[in-house]
Image (spheres, rainbow, N blue to C red):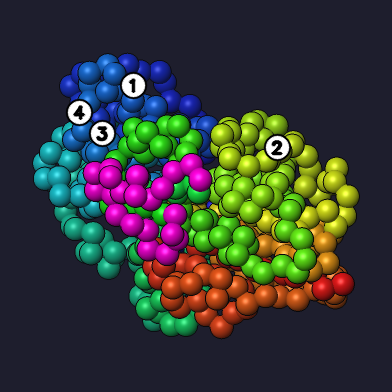
Protein backbone atom coordinates (compact mmCIF):
# COMPACT_ATOMS: atom_id res chain seq x y z
CA UNK A 1 0.00 0.00 0.00
CA UNK A 2 1.53 3.29 -1.05
CA UNK A 3 2.29 5.78 1.69
CA UNK A 4 1.77 8.68 -0.70
CA UNK A 5 -1.40 10.84 -0.55
CA UNK A 6 -4.21 9.10 -2.38
CA UNK A 7 -5.63 12.24 -3.99
CA UNK A 8 -5.10 15.94 -4.53
CA UNK A 9 -7.36 18.35 -2.70
CA UNK A 10 -9.93 19.99 -4.92
CA UNK A 11 -13.03 21.71 -3.56
CA UNK A 12 -16.41 20.23 -4.40
CA UNK A 13 -19.09 22.37 -5.97
CA UNK A 14 -21.70 23.72 -3.52
CA UNK A 15 -24.89 21.69 -3.26
CA UNK A 16 -28.09 21.60 -1.26
CA UNK A 17 -28.84 18.68 1.01
CA UNK A 18 -31.97 16.98 -0.38
CA UNK A 19 -34.78 15.65 1.76
CA UNK A 20 -34.75 12.27 0.01
CA UNK A 21 -31.51 10.89 1.43
CA UNK A 22 -30.04 13.41 3.87
CA UNK A 23 -28.00 10.72 5.67
CA UNK A 24 -25.67 9.95 2.78
CA UNK A 25 -25.39 13.56 1.71
CA UNK A 26 -24.39 14.51 5.25
CA UNK A 27 -21.83 11.70 5.29
CA UNK A 28 -20.41 12.96 1.99
CA UNK A 29 -20.34 16.51 3.37
CA UNK A 30 -18.33 15.31 6.39
CA UNK A 31 -15.83 13.43 4.21
CA UNK A 32 -15.37 16.49 2.02
CA UNK A 33 -14.59 18.61 5.10
CA UNK A 34 -12.04 16.04 6.26
CA UNK A 35 -10.39 16.03 2.84
CA UNK A 36 -10.56 19.71 1.92
CA UNK A 37 -9.88 21.34 5.27
CA UNK A 38 -7.83 18.72 7.10
CA UNK A 39 -10.71 18.64 9.55
CA UNK A 40 -11.18 15.83 12.04
CA UNK A 41 -14.35 13.78 11.79
CA UNK A 42 -14.92 13.87 15.54
CA UNK A 43 -15.07 17.67 15.33
CA UNK A 44 -16.93 18.00 12.02
CA UNK A 45 -19.63 15.38 12.45
CA UNK A 46 -21.33 16.42 15.73
CA UNK A 47 -22.41 19.91 14.57
CA UNK A 48 -23.62 18.47 11.25
CA UNK A 49 -25.71 15.88 13.10
CA UNK A 50 -27.01 18.46 15.54
CA UNK A 51 -28.16 20.75 12.74
CA UNK A 52 -29.80 17.85 10.90
CA UNK A 53 -31.75 16.94 14.04
CA UNK A 54 -32.75 20.56 14.59
CA UNK A 55 -33.95 20.78 10.98
CA UNK A 56 -36.06 17.67 11.48
CA UNK A 57 -34.12 15.67 8.87
CA UNK A 58 -32.69 13.06 11.26
CA UNK A 59 -33.76 10.67 13.97
CA UNK A 60 -31.48 8.53 16.15
CA UNK A 61 -31.22 5.76 13.55
CA UNK A 62 -30.27 8.26 10.86
CA UNK A 63 -27.56 9.71 13.09
CA UNK A 64 -26.19 6.24 13.83
CA UNK A 65 -26.06 5.35 10.13
CA UNK A 66 -24.37 8.62 9.18
CA UNK A 67 -21.79 8.10 11.92
CA UNK A 68 -21.07 4.56 10.75
CA UNK A 69 -20.74 5.68 7.12
CA UNK A 70 -18.26 8.43 7.96
CA UNK A 71 -16.08 6.59 10.46
CA UNK A 72 -16.27 3.25 8.66
CA UNK A 73 -15.25 4.82 5.36
CA UNK A 74 -12.32 6.67 6.94
CA UNK A 75 -11.08 3.64 8.88
CA UNK A 76 -11.16 1.36 5.85
CA UNK A 77 -10.04 3.96 3.32
CA UNK A 78 -6.84 2.15 2.42
CA UNK A 79 -8.59 -1.15 1.81
CA UNK A 80 -11.34 0.50 -0.24
CA UNK A 81 -8.76 2.44 -2.25
CA UNK A 82 -7.12 -0.85 -3.22
CA UNK A 83 -10.47 -2.31 -4.26
CA UNK A 84 -11.53 0.79 -6.18
CA UNK A 85 -8.14 0.92 -7.92
CA UNK A 86 -8.76 -2.59 -9.21
CA UNK A 87 -12.08 -1.46 -10.71
CA UNK A 88 -11.08 1.73 -12.52
CA UNK A 89 -8.95 2.25 -15.61
CA UNK A 90 -6.81 5.08 -14.24
CA UNK A 91 -4.66 5.82 -11.17
CA UNK A 92 -6.68 6.94 -8.14
CA UNK A 93 -4.87 10.28 -8.13
CA UNK A 94 -6.60 11.01 -11.45
CA UNK A 95 -10.08 10.39 -10.01
CA UNK A 96 -11.67 13.59 -8.71
CA UNK A 97 -11.66 13.58 -4.90
CA UNK A 98 -15.44 14.12 -4.57
CA UNK A 99 -16.01 11.15 -6.90
CA UNK A 100 -13.62 9.07 -4.86
CA UNK A 101 -15.50 9.98 -1.67
CA UNK A 102 -18.78 8.77 -3.18
CA UNK A 103 -17.10 5.57 -4.35
CA UNK A 104 -15.60 5.00 -0.91
CA UNK A 105 -18.96 5.51 0.76
CA UNK A 106 -20.47 3.03 -1.66
CA UNK A 107 -17.67 0.54 -1.13
CA UNK A 108 -18.16 0.70 2.63
CA UNK A 109 -21.87 0.03 2.28
CA UNK A 110 -21.15 -2.94 0.01
CA UNK A 111 -18.21 -4.45 1.85
CA UNK A 112 -18.45 -3.18 5.43
CA UNK A 113 -22.16 -3.10 6.33
CA UNK A 114 -25.26 -5.27 6.06
CA UNK A 115 -26.98 -2.89 3.67
CA UNK A 116 -28.36 -4.97 0.75
CA UNK A 117 -26.32 -4.77 -2.42
CA UNK A 118 -29.03 -3.22 -4.58
CA UNK A 119 -29.78 -0.59 -1.95
CA UNK A 120 -26.11 0.29 -1.48
CA UNK A 121 -25.55 0.72 -5.22
CA UNK A 122 -28.76 2.62 -5.96
CA UNK A 123 -28.36 4.96 -2.97
CA UNK A 124 -24.75 5.71 -3.89
CA UNK A 125 -25.63 6.41 -7.52
CA UNK A 126 -28.42 8.74 -6.42
CA UNK A 127 -25.97 10.50 -4.10
CA UNK A 128 -23.61 10.92 -7.05
CA UNK A 129 -26.39 12.49 -9.13
CA UNK A 130 -27.10 14.99 -6.37
CA UNK A 131 -23.54 16.03 -5.54
CA UNK A 132 -21.65 15.25 -8.75
CA UNK A 133 -24.10 15.31 -11.65
CA UNK A 134 -25.53 12.70 -14.04
CA UNK A 135 -22.33 12.13 -16.02
CA UNK A 136 -20.18 11.11 -13.10
CA UNK A 137 -23.07 9.20 -11.57
CA UNK A 138 -22.80 6.77 -14.48
CA UNK A 139 -19.12 6.25 -13.69
CA UNK A 140 -19.97 5.61 -10.02
CA UNK A 141 -22.63 3.12 -11.05
CA UNK A 142 -20.22 1.17 -13.25
CA UNK A 143 -17.49 0.99 -10.59
CA UNK A 144 -19.81 -0.02 -7.74
CA UNK A 145 -21.35 -2.78 -9.83
CA UNK A 146 -17.87 -4.23 -10.27
CA UNK A 147 -17.21 -3.98 -6.53
CA UNK A 148 -20.53 -5.67 -5.79
CA UNK A 149 -19.42 -8.82 -7.62
CA UNK A 150 -17.46 -10.02 -4.59
CA UNK A 151 -17.45 -9.68 -0.80
CA UNK A 152 -14.68 -8.18 1.34
CA UNK A 153 -12.83 -11.46 1.88
CA UNK A 154 -12.88 -12.16 -1.83
CA UNK A 155 -11.54 -8.73 -2.66
CA UNK A 156 -8.78 -9.00 -0.06
CA UNK A 157 -7.60 -12.22 -1.65
CA UNK A 158 -7.33 -10.35 -4.94
CA UNK A 159 -5.80 -7.01 -3.88
CA UNK A 160 -3.61 -7.90 -0.86
CA UNK A 161 -0.28 -9.64 -1.50
CA UNK A 162 0.20 -12.98 0.28
CA UNK A 163 1.45 -12.61 3.84
CA UNK A 164 4.43 -14.89 3.20
CA UNK A 165 5.62 -12.70 0.31
CA UNK A 166 5.21 -9.28 1.91
CA UNK A 167 3.79 -9.37 5.46
CA UNK A 168 3.79 -5.60 6.02
CA UNK A 169 2.00 -4.82 2.76
CA UNK A 170 -0.46 -7.66 3.37
CA UNK A 171 -1.35 -6.27 6.80
CA UNK A 172 -1.49 -2.72 5.43
CA UNK A 173 -4.12 -3.63 2.83
CA UNK A 174 -6.11 -6.07 4.94
CA UNK A 175 -6.25 -3.82 8.01
CA UNK A 176 -6.22 -0.46 6.25
CA UNK A 177 -3.11 1.21 7.67
CA UNK A 178 -0.26 2.82 5.74
CA UNK A 179 2.63 0.43 5.41
CA UNK A 180 5.01 2.63 7.40
CA UNK A 181 2.53 2.74 10.29
CA UNK A 182 2.23 -1.06 10.27
CA UNK A 183 6.02 -1.29 10.40
CA UNK A 184 6.34 1.24 13.22
CA UNK A 185 3.60 -0.35 15.34
CA UNK A 186 5.08 -3.80 14.81
CA UNK A 187 8.50 -2.61 15.93
CA UNK A 188 7.00 -0.99 19.03
CA UNK A 189 4.88 -4.00 19.89
CA UNK A 190 7.40 -6.72 19.16
CA UNK A 191 6.32 -10.34 19.04
CA UNK A 192 4.71 -12.28 16.21
CA UNK A 193 1.83 -11.88 13.82
CA UNK A 194 -1.04 -12.31 16.31
CA UNK A 195 -0.17 -9.22 18.36
CA UNK A 196 0.12 -6.82 15.44
CA UNK A 197 -3.07 -8.10 13.84
CA UNK A 198 -4.95 -7.70 17.12
CA UNK A 199 -3.66 -4.13 17.41
CA UNK A 200 -4.58 -3.21 13.84
CA UNK A 201 -8.05 -4.69 14.31
CA UNK A 202 -8.48 -2.68 17.51
CA UNK A 203 -7.53 0.50 15.64
CA UNK A 204 -10.48 -0.15 13.32
CA UNK A 205 -13.03 -0.61 16.09
CA UNK A 206 -15.20 2.20 17.37
CA UNK A 207 -14.04 3.03 20.92
CA UNK A 208 -16.37 3.41 23.84
CA UNK A 209 -16.96 6.87 25.27
CA UNK A 210 -15.11 7.11 28.58
CA UNK A 211 -15.86 9.76 31.20
CA UNK A 212 -13.78 10.98 34.12
CA UNK A 213 -15.37 12.06 37.39
CA UNK A 214 -13.11 14.88 38.55
CA UNK A 215 -12.33 14.40 42.26
CA UNK A 216 -14.05 16.82 44.57
CA UNK A 217 -16.48 17.83 41.83
CA UNK A 218 -18.23 14.65 40.70
CA UNK A 219 -18.33 10.98 41.64
CA UNK A 220 -18.42 7.80 39.62
CA UNK A 221 -21.64 6.90 41.46
CA UNK A 222 -23.28 9.98 39.97
CA UNK A 223 -22.13 9.08 36.46
CA UNK A 224 -23.14 5.43 36.88
CA UNK A 225 -26.74 6.58 37.28
CA UNK A 226 -26.70 7.35 33.56
CA UNK A 227 -28.25 4.84 31.17
CA UNK A 228 -25.83 2.17 29.88
CA UNK A 229 -23.00 3.51 32.08
CA UNK A 230 -20.57 0.93 33.49
CA UNK A 231 -17.45 1.31 35.64
CA UNK A 232 -14.09 1.91 34.02
CA UNK A 233 -11.65 -0.95 33.76
CA UNK A 234 -8.60 0.56 35.48
CA UNK A 235 -9.06 4.14 36.64
CA UNK A 236 -11.08 4.66 39.86
CA UNK A 237 -12.47 7.85 38.31
CA UNK A 238 -13.58 6.32 34.99
CA UNK A 239 -17.06 5.46 33.75
CA UNK A 240 -17.73 3.99 30.31
CA UNK A 241 -20.83 4.65 28.20
CA UNK A 242 -21.07 1.12 26.83
CA UNK A 243 -23.71 1.92 24.23
CA UNK A 244 -22.44 5.29 23.15
CA UNK A 245 -24.67 8.17 24.16
CA UNK A 246 -24.24 11.91 24.10
CA UNK A 247 -21.82 13.01 26.84
CA UNK A 248 -22.92 16.62 26.56
CA UNK A 249 -26.40 15.65 27.72
CA UNK A 250 -25.01 14.46 31.07
CA UNK A 251 -25.32 17.19 33.71
CA UNK A 252 -21.89 16.63 35.29
CA UNK A 253 -20.21 16.87 31.88
CA UNK A 254 -22.18 19.93 30.83
CA UNK A 255 -21.22 21.62 34.11
CA UNK A 256 -17.53 20.72 33.77
CA UNK A 257 -17.49 18.55 36.89
CA UNK A 258 -16.80 15.53 34.69
CA UNK A 259 -15.33 15.22 31.21
CA UNK A 260 -14.69 12.91 28.31
CA UNK A 261 -11.25 11.37 28.79
CA UNK A 262 -9.71 8.12 27.63
CA UNK A 263 -8.79 5.83 30.49
CA UNK A 264 -5.17 5.76 29.35
CA UNK A 265 -4.93 9.53 29.81
CA UNK A 266 -6.45 9.20 33.28
CA UNK A 267 -3.88 6.56 34.22
CA UNK A 268 -1.00 8.82 33.15
CA UNK A 269 -2.21 11.64 35.39
CA UNK A 270 -2.90 9.29 38.30
CA UNK A 271 0.52 7.64 38.06
CA UNK A 272 2.30 10.99 38.19
CA UNK A 273 0.14 12.14 41.11
CA UNK A 274 0.76 8.92 43.07
CA UNK A 275 4.54 8.75 42.58
CA UNK A 276 6.29 9.25 45.92
CA UNK A 277 8.33 12.45 46.18
CA UNK A 278 10.82 13.45 48.82
CA UNK A 279 10.01 16.53 50.84
CA UNK A 280 7.46 19.16 49.90
CA UNK A 281 4.59 18.55 47.49
CA UNK A 282 3.04 21.97 46.87
CA UNK A 283 3.73 22.94 43.23
CA UNK A 284 2.63 20.90 40.21
CA UNK A 285 3.13 21.73 36.53
CA UNK A 286 1.35 20.53 33.40
CA UNK A 287 3.80 21.75 30.79
CA UNK A 288 1.73 20.87 27.68
CA UNK A 289 -1.74 21.37 29.04
CA UNK A 290 -3.94 21.89 25.98
CA UNK A 291 -6.76 21.15 25.57
CA UNK A 292 -7.05 20.56 29.32
CA UNK A 293 -8.22 17.02 30.06
CA UNK A 294 -5.18 15.91 32.05
CA UNK A 295 -4.84 19.37 33.61
CA UNK A 296 -8.40 19.18 34.94
CA UNK A 297 -7.74 15.80 36.55
CA UNK A 298 -4.33 16.85 37.88
CA UNK A 299 -5.83 20.06 39.23
CA UNK A 300 -8.48 18.13 41.14
CA UNK A 301 -5.91 15.70 42.53
CA UNK A 302 -3.60 18.58 43.52
CA UNK A 303 -6.48 20.32 45.28
CA UNK A 304 -7.02 17.28 47.51
CA UNK A 305 -3.45 17.76 48.81
CA UNK A 306 -3.47 21.53 49.00
CA UNK A 307 -1.08 21.84 46.05
CA UNK A 308 -1.23 24.43 43.26
CA UNK A 309 -1.30 23.43 39.60
CA UNK A 310 0.26 25.63 36.94
CA UNK A 311 -1.06 24.68 33.52
CA UNK A 312 1.04 25.98 30.63
CA UNK A 313 0.06 25.91 26.96
CA UNK A 314 1.84 27.67 24.12
CA UNK A 315 -1.16 28.45 21.90
CA UNK A 316 -3.43 31.12 23.44
CA UNK A 317 -6.64 29.61 22.09
CA UNK A 318 -5.70 26.21 23.54
CA UNK A 319 -4.78 27.91 26.82
CA UNK A 320 -8.35 29.20 26.80
CA UNK A 321 -9.61 25.61 26.52
CA UNK A 322 -7.44 24.67 29.48
CA UNK A 323 -8.86 27.52 31.53
CA UNK A 324 -12.37 26.36 30.66
CA UNK A 325 -11.57 22.79 31.71
CA UNK A 326 -10.12 23.96 35.03
CA UNK A 327 -12.91 26.45 35.81
CA UNK A 328 -14.50 25.51 39.11
CA UNK A 329 -11.50 23.49 40.30
CA UNK A 330 -11.75 23.29 44.12
CA UNK A 331 -8.10 24.18 44.66
CA UNK A 332 -5.68 26.86 43.48
CA UNK A 333 -4.50 26.83 39.89
CA UNK A 334 -3.12 29.14 37.23
CA UNK A 335 -3.20 28.93 33.44
CA UNK A 336 -0.51 30.64 31.35
CA UNK A 337 0.12 30.86 27.62
CA UNK A 338 3.83 30.10 27.45
CA UNK A 339 6.33 28.27 25.27
CA UNK A 340 7.22 25.12 27.16
CA UNK A 341 10.75 25.16 25.74
CA UNK A 342 11.32 28.75 26.95
CA UNK A 343 9.44 28.85 30.24
CA UNK A 344 8.85 31.98 32.34
CA UNK A 345 9.32 30.09 35.63
CA UNK A 346 12.58 29.43 37.44
CA UNK A 347 14.41 26.09 37.29
CA UNK A 348 13.60 23.71 40.13
CA UNK A 349 10.26 25.37 40.89
CA UNK A 350 8.05 22.27 40.84
CA UNK A 351 7.59 19.05 42.76
CA UNK A 352 5.74 17.23 39.97
CA UNK A 353 5.83 17.94 36.24
CA UNK A 354 3.84 16.35 33.42
CA UNK A 355 4.72 16.82 29.76
CA UNK A 356 2.27 15.10 27.40
CA UNK A 357 4.15 16.11 24.29
CA UNK A 358 2.85 16.77 20.76
CA UNK A 359 3.30 13.67 18.63
CA UNK A 360 2.10 11.77 15.56
CA UNK A 361 -0.96 10.52 17.45
CA UNK A 362 -0.50 6.94 16.26
CA UNK A 363 -1.87 5.74 19.58
CA UNK A 364 -5.30 7.28 19.01
CA UNK A 365 -6.15 5.99 15.54
CA UNK A 366 -9.40 4.51 16.89
CA UNK A 367 -10.65 8.01 17.63
CA UNK A 368 -9.09 9.84 14.70
CA UNK A 369 -9.02 7.35 11.83
CA UNK A 370 -8.13 10.02 9.28
CA UNK A 371 -4.85 10.74 11.10
CA UNK A 372 -3.26 7.56 9.75
CA UNK A 373 -3.62 8.87 6.19
CA UNK A 374 -2.26 12.34 6.98
CA UNK A 375 0.87 11.43 8.88
CA UNK A 376 4.13 10.74 7.03
CA UNK A 377 7.38 9.21 8.31
CA UNK A 378 9.13 12.57 8.03
CA UNK A 379 6.68 14.01 10.59
CA UNK A 380 8.81 12.28 13.19
CA UNK A 381 11.73 14.56 12.31
CA UNK A 382 9.55 17.57 12.93
CA UNK A 383 8.37 16.41 16.34
CA UNK A 384 11.73 15.14 17.61
CA UNK A 385 13.34 18.50 18.56
CA UNK A 386 10.14 19.69 20.24
CA UNK A 387 9.70 16.49 22.25
CA UNK A 388 13.29 16.60 23.46
CA UNK A 389 13.07 20.30 24.20
CA UNK A 390 9.92 19.89 26.28
CA UNK A 391 11.37 16.99 28.28
CA UNK A 392 14.58 18.96 28.82
CA UNK A 393 12.59 21.90 30.21
CA UNK A 394 10.57 19.54 32.42
CA UNK A 395 13.72 18.05 33.92
CA UNK A 396 15.11 21.53 34.52
CA UNK A 397 11.83 22.68 36.06
CA UNK A 398 11.53 19.96 38.69
CA UNK A 399 13.42 20.17 41.97
CA UNK A 400 15.81 17.53 43.26
CA UNK A 401 13.68 14.70 44.64
CA UNK A 402 10.75 15.65 42.44
CA UNK A 403 9.33 13.65 39.55
CA UNK A 404 8.67 14.21 35.84
CA UNK A 405 6.15 12.28 33.78
CA UNK A 406 6.91 12.08 30.05
CA UNK A 407 3.80 10.98 28.15
CA UNK A 408 2.79 10.69 24.54
CA UNK A 409 -0.17 9.28 22.65
CA UNK A 410 2.08 7.39 20.28
CA UNK A 411 3.81 4.04 20.71
CA UNK A 412 6.42 4.86 18.05
CA UNK A 413 9.83 4.11 19.57
CA UNK A 414 11.26 7.32 18.10
CA UNK A 415 8.73 9.31 20.17
CA UNK A 416 8.94 7.28 23.36
CA UNK A 417 12.01 5.38 24.54
CA UNK A 418 14.42 7.11 22.15
CA UNK A 419 13.47 10.53 23.54
CA UNK A 420 13.74 9.40 27.15
CA UNK A 421 17.09 7.66 26.56
CA UNK A 422 18.56 10.78 24.92
CA UNK A 423 17.55 13.07 27.77
CA UNK A 424 18.71 10.72 30.50
CA UNK A 425 22.18 10.90 28.92
CA UNK A 426 22.04 14.69 29.13
CA UNK A 427 20.81 14.59 32.75
CA UNK A 428 22.93 12.00 34.54
CA UNK A 429 21.49 12.96 37.94
CA UNK A 430 18.18 11.32 37.14
CA UNK A 431 16.67 7.86 37.44
CA UNK A 432 13.77 6.06 35.85
CA UNK A 433 11.02 5.04 38.28
CA UNK A 434 9.19 1.77 37.75
CA UNK A 435 5.77 3.04 36.64
CA UNK A 436 4.04 -0.34 36.72
CA UNK A 437 3.17 -0.41 40.46
CA UNK A 438 1.61 3.04 40.03
CA UNK A 439 -1.02 1.57 37.69
CA UNK A 440 -2.50 -0.96 40.15
CA UNK A 441 -4.61 -3.70 38.64
CA UNK A 442 -3.56 -2.98 35.05
CA UNK A 443 -2.17 -6.19 33.51
CA UNK A 444 0.47 -6.87 30.87
CA UNK A 445 2.60 -3.78 31.41
CA UNK A 446 5.78 -5.34 30.11
CA UNK A 447 9.23 -5.38 31.64
CA UNK A 448 9.23 -1.71 32.73
CA UNK A 449 10.32 0.60 34.09
CA UNK A 450 8.30 2.62 31.56
CA UNK A 451 4.78 1.68 30.51
CA UNK A 452 3.13 1.30 27.13
CA UNK A 453 -0.65 0.87 27.04
CA UNK A 454 -2.39 -0.73 24.04
CA UNK A 455 -5.92 -0.62 22.60
CA UNK A 456 -6.06 -4.38 22.02
CA UNK A 457 -4.68 -5.26 25.47
CA UNK A 458 -6.01 -2.56 27.79
CA UNK A 459 -8.89 -1.03 25.85
CA UNK A 460 -7.21 2.40 26.02
CA UNK A 461 -5.40 4.61 23.57
CA UNK A 462 -1.76 3.59 23.13
CA UNK A 463 -0.42 5.95 25.79
CA UNK A 464 3.23 5.84 26.77
CA UNK A 465 4.55 6.95 30.18
CA UNK A 466 8.03 7.25 31.64
CA UNK A 467 8.50 8.55 35.19
CA UNK A 468 11.84 10.24 35.93
CA UNK A 469 13.14 11.44 39.28
CA UNK A 470 15.75 14.18 39.71
CA UNK A 471 18.41 12.84 42.07
CA UNK A 472 20.83 15.71 42.02
Neighbour tally class for label 3: few under 14, some 14-19, many 20 plus, Cα within 10 Å: many
Disc number for residue 59: 4
Gap between marks 1 and 4 measured at Cα: 12 Å
**Residue in front for this viewpoint, 192 or 359:** 359
Callout 2–callout 3 Cβ contact below 8 Å:
no
Say which residue label 3 marks.
63
Say which residue label 2 marks.
335
Gap between marks 2 and 1 measured at Cα: 33 Å
Q: Position of residue 413 (x, y in %)?
A: 62, 70
Disc number for residue 150: none
Q: Residue 48: which quarter of the image? A: top left
Say which residue label 1 marks.
51
Quarter of the picture holding the C terminus: bottom right
* Identity of the residue drawn at 34% across and 40% down: 70
Give the residues drawn in magenta, as a range.
Answer: 216-237
Q: Is residue 387 visible?
A: no
Callout 4–callout 2 Cβ contact below 8 Å:
no
Amino acid sequence: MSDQPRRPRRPAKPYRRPKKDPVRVLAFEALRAVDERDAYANLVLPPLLRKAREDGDFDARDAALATELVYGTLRRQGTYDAVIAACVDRPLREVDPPVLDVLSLGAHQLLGTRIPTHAAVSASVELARVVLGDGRAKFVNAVLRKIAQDDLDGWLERVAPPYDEDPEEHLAVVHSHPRWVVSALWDSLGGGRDGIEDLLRADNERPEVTLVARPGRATTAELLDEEAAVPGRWSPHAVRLAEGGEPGAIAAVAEGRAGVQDEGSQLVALALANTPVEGRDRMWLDGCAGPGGKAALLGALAAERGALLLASEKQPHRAGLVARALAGNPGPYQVVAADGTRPPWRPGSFDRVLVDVPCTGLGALRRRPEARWRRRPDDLEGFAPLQRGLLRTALESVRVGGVVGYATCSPHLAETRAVVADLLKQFPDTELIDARPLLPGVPDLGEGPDVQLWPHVHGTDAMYLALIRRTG
